[in-house]
Image: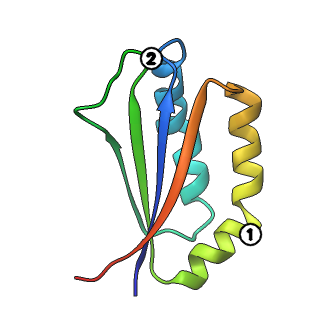
Amino acid sequence: MPIVYSITTKVSKEIAPRWLLWMQEEHIPAILSTGHFSAHQLLQLLDQDDSEGPTYSLQLTAQNRSLYETYLNECAPALREEAFRLWGNQFISFRSILEVVN
């Protein structure tokens, strides 16, 4: 069964435009280059309090849980470290995994 790895991130308004560009041009391509995901979407949440900054959801599709777990164990730590090096505490993320039912 395909797995969707969802990363929801609240970004401070001070870095939001630069962060979004970095996501589109660097971070998402780096994640996809690992070969563990076959599709992705970057979405902005609506009906949120954006006074402190926008909220985004990156949804990545892996063809099975094994590919997701390999990514999580072998690739994610370095990519997360890079995000914190660049943006510090100007964002907060939470992660979910979902199984595609239909």
Q: Position of residue 30 (x, y in %)?
A: 61, 50
Q: Tell me the colour scheme of the image.
A: rainbow
Q: Amino acid at mark 2?
A: Glu
Pick out the residue farthest to the front. Answer: 49
Helix, strand or loop for disc 1: helix
Helix, strand or loop for disc 2: loop
Q: Position of residue 31 (x, y in %)?
A: 58, 55
- Which is more toward the observer, 25 or 42? 42
> Is 74 above or below relative to 28?
below
Q: Amino acid at mark 1?
A: Asn
Pick out the residue farthest to the top. Answer: 14
Left or right? Give the position of 102 relative to 92: left
> Is 29 above or below relative to 68?
above
Q: Residue at x 68, y 26 (%)?
A: 89
Q: Residue at x 58, y 36 (%)?
A: 92
Q: Position of residue 9 (x, y in %)?
A: 49, 39
Q: Position of residue 4 (x, y in %)?
A: 42, 68
Left or right? Give the position of 69 relative to 13: right
Neighbours of disc 1 within 10 Å: few (<14), some (14-19), many (20+) = few
- Which is more toward the observer, 95 or 38? 95
Left or right? Give the position of 33 relative to 82: left
Pick out the residue farthest to the bottom. Answer: 1
